């Protein structure tokens, strides 16, 4: 067997080689992605890579990097290549069974936290996916009961795994359910549900084809799942409790109307960091 010849001798050179390969394949965020890949090859956190730039690069590192670069240039999302992704201060295991947690959903959580003025004893995360919102709620309110709901048993298994990874499994109940049921049980309902219109699904970037359709497909206008969820959430909330939802571009105003129709008061619409009116909150 012949040894693999390394084109790079150090971590810094490996980053440069990987970035060039991604650039040649037409990617734009090449430095960020190559640092992520090289850091994980070395078992380092990406933030620690700059301090280890002179670290020797071995043929074993080279083989793993090549496998990952082959996947990435076939448009497998970086998060699935790495097998994990950060959500707030949690690193979550992610597979194609779950949506890759997005930074917008971190914003949703921050908004919900800052709007909760009273004690929080029960929280629901509807459509939990990898479990990010449920974990964040359990971490933020350690004495609260958190219920993570999803139709997908595969997603729930992964969310439970992530809760175990962070020592929060005892605080979160994982329930396979269509949206949310119950009567006056929760102080806070968080929901990042599918909101892409079915007709738009095929025109999206190729990476999205790897993500589960049940996590993306929001029906004819994108709001079919949200529309069913809003009145159910109203019933599931205690008086004074709040619902916080994430939706897509152009869906903020229609969602605000849905909350008002369902009886929510103090309905608020907030923009994300890109200025899109994406977050809708209301009080029962
Ligand atoms: C957009 S993903 C969001 C996942 C996670 N909350 C996040 O922010 O990363 C939507 C999630 O809702 C789930 N879902 C879709 N329809 C549902 C339904 N009717 N009831 C419960 N969960 C549903 C999907 O399986 C998926 O995990």
Image (spheres, rainbow, N blue to C red):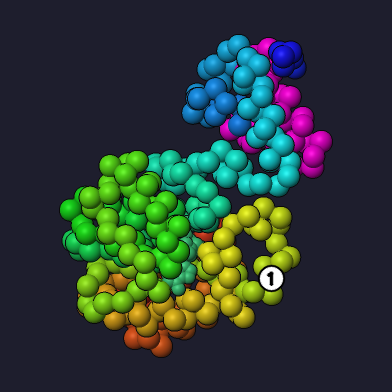
Residue shown at 32%/41% (left/top)? 166
x, y percent for residue 4: 72, 16
Q: Farthest residue toward the front?
A: 1
Q: Which quarter of the rendering shows the N terminus?
A: top right
* Left or right: 10 in relation to 190: right
* Left or right: 82 in relation to 182: right
Residue shown at 57%/45% (left/top)? 80
Residue marked by disc 1: 200
x, y percent for residue 157: 39, 54
The vertical placement of 204 against 32, above or below, is: below
* Left or right: 132 in relation to 54: left
Magenta-tinted stretch: 8-36
Can see residue 102?
A: no
Magenta highlight on residue 21: yes
Residue shown at 64%/74% (left/top)? 198
Nearest the camera: 58 or 123?
58
Can see residue 68?
A: yes
x, y percent for residue 119: 18, 61
């Amino acid at each position: 067997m012949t040894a693999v010849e390394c084109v790079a001798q150090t971590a810094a050179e490996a980053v440069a080689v990987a970035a060039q390969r991604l650039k040649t394949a037409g990617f734009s965020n090449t430095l960020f992605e190559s640092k992520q890949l090289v850091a994980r090859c070395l078992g380092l956190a990406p933030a620690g890579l700059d301090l280890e730039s002179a670290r020797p690069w071995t043929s074993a590192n080279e083989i793993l990097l090549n496998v990952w670069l082959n996947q990435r240039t076939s448009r497998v999302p970086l998060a699935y290549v790495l097998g994990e992704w950060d959500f707030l201060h949690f690193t979550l295991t992610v597979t194609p069974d779950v949506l890759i947690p997005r930074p917008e959903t971190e914003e949703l959580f921050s908004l919900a936290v800052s709007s909760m003025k009273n004690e929080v004893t029960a929280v629901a995360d509807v459509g939990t996916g990898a479990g990010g919102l449920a974990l964040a709620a359990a971490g933020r309110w350690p004495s609260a009961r958190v219920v993570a709901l999803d139709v997908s048993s595969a997603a729930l298994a992964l969310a439970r795994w992530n809760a175990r990874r962070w020592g929060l499994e005892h605080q979160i109940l994982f329930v396979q359910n269509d949206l949310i049921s119950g009567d006056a049980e929760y102080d806070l309902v968080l929901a990042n549900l599918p909101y892409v219109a079915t007709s738009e699904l095929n025109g999206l970037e190729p990476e999205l084809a790897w993500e589960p359709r049940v996590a993306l497909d929001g029906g004819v206008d994108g709001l079919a799942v949200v529309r069913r969820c809003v009145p159910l959430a109203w019933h599931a909330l205690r008086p004074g409790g709040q619902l916080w939802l994430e939706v897509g571009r152009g869906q903020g105003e229609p969602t605000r109307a849905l909350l008002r129709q369902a009886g929510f008061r103090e309905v608020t619409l907030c923009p994300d960091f890109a200025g899109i009116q994406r977050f809708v909150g209301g009080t029962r």
